[in-house]
């Protein structure tokens, strides 16, 4: 029996009519980035949604403008692509300002697409505004549904209309256990994350601009790289610490952090043509703390000369010494140099991340290690490793039961030797020590 594909509904409209707020209202959670500034949403971003037990995919788009140029034109193009791929369209207008020429231009595009359209007259926060919503009949798209994305007013009727416009949607199913490996593309703004996703996807999947901070929402895309299928997640550039960020940048940072947590492998994109910054190191640290597998991609290799490469080697030696375990690859997202080699690095990192060591092998290793390199004597006492076990993989986490507290330096030494013996390429390794209680503490 063929499985039903989830139907797709594209949410379109001119800038700042409340599309992303309405998307959040339909999802029942704050997922899309929202701010009172036009143009915060730039790419088409998909979310899984359901209403009354029926599932569908909601595609949020950037504001559509007919006379757009530059980045705005790319945003409009993404919105038109979303319409062409959708089964139905949710057209959002602002009831408080009435019908504008820009809305009429969107209507012409919708008519050409010949897709079913549900018209949402947004910002109808109370009964007084309902007459304004009724004036939207003049768009010729059928009944306008008055809603307040902010307060939820009328959203139930709107959702019923959406389901009526969509082809038969499958009922909610249990989440599939297996699926493409989830890979997040992370890095500071303007290092070429979106360009890399577009190159891997072999299409203009996300808006790319020299203006840093173009991507705001994480964008998922199923992509085949080197014969392997991945779910790639393009994320917003983390400009500064989350606490210091404000407005949509704050929410974008939170979503990027959530994308790291959701991923199995993170591709950390570093601009090879510029010096490594504290921001790069902070992002690497957050990937390690989240316990995700890591591949470091030095992008813009085509912009580096012999001298810059010499300096970069020194920077790697000095600043990235703590991440020697991560595979590195020199790429150019613009020219496509080495991007096909990312698949091998991703698989290598994922294999290290999933590695499990049997308790027998681990304790034989710890016995040999302690005999050759015992813990230094501290205060007349010498802590011993009594037993070790791997508590989990993804990432590999080891618990050492010891006769006393161990120095941090010795813990790092054990971690380094674990890597030498068992690999763990591309994965952080966590070592925890559980010191045996003294007899008087037990009493």
Image (spheres, grey):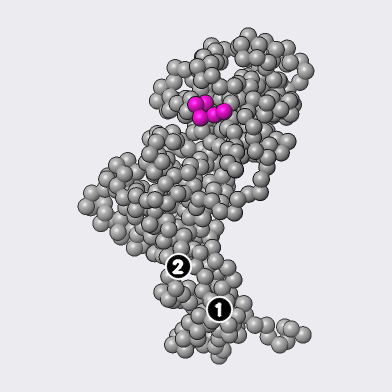
Quarter of the image for the N terminus: give it. Answer: top right
Question: How many residues crowd mark 2 within 10 Å: few (<14), some (14–19), many (20+)?
Answer: many
Q: Which mark is residue 359?
A: 1
Residue sitting at the far left: 306
Is residue 394 left or right of 95 when viewed as pictured?
Answer: left
Residue at point 44%, 73% (across, down) = 422
Q: Is residue 421 above or below residue 312?
A: below
- Which residue is located at x 51 percent, y 55 percent? 264
Residue 150 image point, x, y percent: 69, 29
Nearer the observer, disc 1 or disc 2? 1
- Single out the residue that lies furthest toward the front: 1
Relative image position of residue 6 (x, y in whole percent) = 59, 37
* Magenta span contains residue 381: no
Taking depth in this image into account, of 6 and 70 the one nearest to the observer is 6
User: How many dots with numbers?
Assistant: 2
Viewport quadrant of the C terminus:
bottom right
Magenta span covers which residues? 82-87
Sort mark 1 into few (<14), some (14-19) or many (20+) by Cα contacts within 10 Å: some
Task: Give the residue at x 51% y 38%.
Answer: 216
Q: Is residue 83 magenta?
A: yes
């Amino acid at each position: 029996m063929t499985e039903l594909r989830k139907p797709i509904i594209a949410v379109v409209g001119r800038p700042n009519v409340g599309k992303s707020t309405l998307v959040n209202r339909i999802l029942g959670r704050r997922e899309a980035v929202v701010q009172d500034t036009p143009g915060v949403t730039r790419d088409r971003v998909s979310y899984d949604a359901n209403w009354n037990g029926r599932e569908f995919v909601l595609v949020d788009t950037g504001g559509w403008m007919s006379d757009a140029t530059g980045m705005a034109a790319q945003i409009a193009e993404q919105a038109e692509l979303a319409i062409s791929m959708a089964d139905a369209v949710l057209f959002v207008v602002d009831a408080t300002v009435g019908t504008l020429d820009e809305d009429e231009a969107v209507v012409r595009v919708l008519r050409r697409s010949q897709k079913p359209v549900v018209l949402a007259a947004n910002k109808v926060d109370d009964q007084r505004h309902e007459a304004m919503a009724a004036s939207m009949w003049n768009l010729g798209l059928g009944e306008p549904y008055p809603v307040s994305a902010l307060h939820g007013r009328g959203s139930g009727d709107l959702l019923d209309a959406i389901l009526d416009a969509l082809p038969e949607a499958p009922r909610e199913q249990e989440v599939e256990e297996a699926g493409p490996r989830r890979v997040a593309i992370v890095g500071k703004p303007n290092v070429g994350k979106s360009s890399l996703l577009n190159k891997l996807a072999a299409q203009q999947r996300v808006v790319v601009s020299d203006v840093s901070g173009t991507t705001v929402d994480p964008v998922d895309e199923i992509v085949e790289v080197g014969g392997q299928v991945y779910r790639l997640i393009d994320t917003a550039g983390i400009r500064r610490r989350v606490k210091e960020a404000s407005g949509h940048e704050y929410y974008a940072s939170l979503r990027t952090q959530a994308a790291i947590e959701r991923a199995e492998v993170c591709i950390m994109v570093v601009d090879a043509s510029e010096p490594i910054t504290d921001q790069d190191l902070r992002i690497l640290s957050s990937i390690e703390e989240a316990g995700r597998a890591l591949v470091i991609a030095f992008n813009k290799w085509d912009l580096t000369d012999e001298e810059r490469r010499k300096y970069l080697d020194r920077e790697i030696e000095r600043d990235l010494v703590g991440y020697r375990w991560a595979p590195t690859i020199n790429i150019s997202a613009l020219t496509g140099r080495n991007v096909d080699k990312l698949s091998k690095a991703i698989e290598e990192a994922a294999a290290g991340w999933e590695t499990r060591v049997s308790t027998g092998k681990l304790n034989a290793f710890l016995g040999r290690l302690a005999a050759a390199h015992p813990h230094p004597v501290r205060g007349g006492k010498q802590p011993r490793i009594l037993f070790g076990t791997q508590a989990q993989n993804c990432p590999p986490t080891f618990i050492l039961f010891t006769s006393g507290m161990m120095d941090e330096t010795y813990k790092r030494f054990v971690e380094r030797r674990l890597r030498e013996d068992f690999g763990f390429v591309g994965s952080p390794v966590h070592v925890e020590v559980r010191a045996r209680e003294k007899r008087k503490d037990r009493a």
